[in-house]
Image: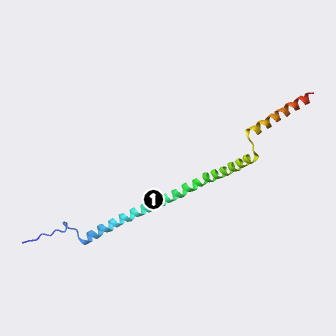
Amino acid sequence: MQINVSTSEQPTHLDILNYLKGLGGRLDTVEKRIESIDNRVSNFDKEVKRLWVAPDDKVKRVDDRVSRIEDKVDGADIGPPYCRRKYRDWRRNATHSVVISLT
């Protein structure tokens, strides 16, 4: 009986180790790419947050100004009847001044 053993039929331990090293190198490359993408996403998030700070600050300042104006208007007790009366008085005085200056 003769046993024919061919080395190409089964990989040797060295072949398996070389294959695993190549696979490990590929995994390292994938990890580096993932880290790079992760860094880009992190930088993008920072940039977006920085861009939103300016409009948020502007909105807050405008809200503060509107609140102050509303407080002044509420405190001044300016309402439609008061405004109508003031306008009527102003018109009466303005018309009276014109008549006086013509005479």
Q: Amino acid at mark 1?
A: Ile
Specify the quadrant of the image occupied by residue 18: bottom left
Q: Determine the residue positioned at 31% across, 68% down.
A: 20
Residue 80 location in percent, x, y?
73, 38
Residue 96 location in percent, x, y?
87, 31
Residue 103 location in percent, x, y?
93, 27
Q: Is residue 75 above or below residue 10?
A: above
Residue 79 location in percent, x, y?
73, 41
Q: Is residue 43 above or below residue 14?
A: above
Q: Determine the residue positioned at 23% across, 70% down.
A: 12
Query: Does dot 1 land on a helix, a strand or a loop?
Result: helix
Which quadrant: the N terminus? bottom left
Q: Residue furthest front?
A: 81
Q: Determine the residue positioned at 54% across, 58% down.
A: 46
User: On the image, numbered disc 1 is attached to which residue?
Assistant: 37
| Color style of the picture | rainbow
Q: Determine the residue positioned at 38% across, 65% down.
A: 28
Label tally: 1
**94 displayed left or right of 55:** right
**Front position in the image: 36 or 73:** 73
